Amino acid sequence: MALNYNGMLAAHWPETLWAVQRGLFYGDAFFESIRVFEGRIPLLDLHLERLFGGLRAMGYVWDADWTPDFWKKEILCVTGQSNARVRLTVWRAPGGWYLPEQDRAQYLITASPMDSSNFVWLDAGLKAGLVTSVRLPVDAWSGFKTLNAARYVAAAREAESKGWDEGVLLNAMERVCEAVNSNIFWFEGPVLCTVPLSDGCVTGTLRKILLLLRAQQALPVQEKAATFATLMAADELFFTNAIQGIRWVREFEGKAYDCAKTRSLFQEMVAQMSRE
């Protein structure tokens, strides 16, 4: 099949471009953003749990040796014993239109250096706002990280244009879902709250760690549906992801927030991660 790539004509697909055809055409791919701390990958098992959940749901086929030890070795081949942000992308082998010709999984690992060997507390906090340009769907695929990220790109552009550090997205039912690249938590008095997975947020690895940490300490935690008004009434508000850890919000839509409980939770989380 002939193609025109930015004005360059070719009679056949270049082999390297054809290899990613299904990801390019259909977003038929999953990815994980993984933090490496001086060669340690404490959240690897949780990342793989989410990744393979998506692959199974979409009927992928992969090699039997794709074990945690395999992925640790493959990742460290790229990063060594350094501090790094890793992206693991898995897509289906090329061929077919909507219906694939084959289901064999392919992968790519890329990495970029990071300065610290642990999560860093942001003294200044974040300024955040409510995204109005998009709404997130809620379905069986919402918890996975796929290449179908156009809504998040639009939300990130809106946040940048309005001078925010981060944007809060609602789902199709007008309930709080997540931030552009993070899960959302907030404190109501002593109770730590977060959005339930049933409202469409990504099944965050650090989200799971925090919920387990609170349960181990028998501290109050609640997964509950939230609206814009819920966040405006909260005492503290923060975002979590596997790359940046916990980031507290100092201002959301004009309201200022405290961070004492969030900072204490951050310190507990760092201590827990250091033991992993």
Image: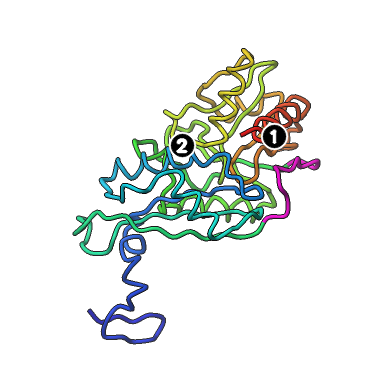
Q: What residue is disc 2 on?
A: 171
**Residue farthest along the right direction in this orientation:** 123
Q: Position of residue 248 (x, y in %)?
A: 71, 36
Specify the amino acid type for callout 2: Asn
Pointer 1 and pointer 2: residues touching (CB < 8 Å)?
Answer: no
**Mark positioned earlier in the residue sequence (1 or 2):** 2
Colour scheme in use:
rainbow
Taking the image as shown, residue 241 lies to the left or right of residue 149, namely right
Numbered disc 1: secondary structure: helix
For residue 262, above or below residue 121: above
Q: Position of residue 15 (x, y in %)?
A: 32, 75
Q: Position of residue 275 (x, y in %)?
A: 65, 32
Which residue lies at the image location 57% right of the left edge and 30% below the top edge? 209
Q: What residue is disc 1 on?
A: 270
Which quarter of the figure has residue 199?
top left
Viewer-side residue, 96 vs 151: 96
Q: Position of residue 72 (x, y in %)?
A: 50, 49
Other residues around mark 1 within 10 Å, as few (<14) / some (14–19) / many (≥20): some
Mark drawn on residue 26: none
Nearer to us of marks 1 and 2 is 1
Taking the image as shown, residue 206 lies to the left or right of residue 7, namely right
> Would residue 259 be counted in the magenta stretch?
no
Q: Write down the region rendered in magenta.
A: 114-125
Which residue lies at the image location 44% right of the left edge and 42% below the top edge? 48
Measure how far apart labels 1 and 2 are at the Cα level.
Answer: 31 Å
Give the quadrant of the N terminus: bottom left
Which residue lies at the image location 66% right of the left edge and 30% below the top edge? 272
Numbered disc 2: secondary structure: loop
Specify the amino acid type for callout 1: Val
Which residue lies at the image location 32% right of the left edge and 63% below the top edge? 25
Give the quadrant of the C terminus: top right
Other residues around mark 2 within 10 Å, as few (<14) / some (14–19) / many (≥20): some
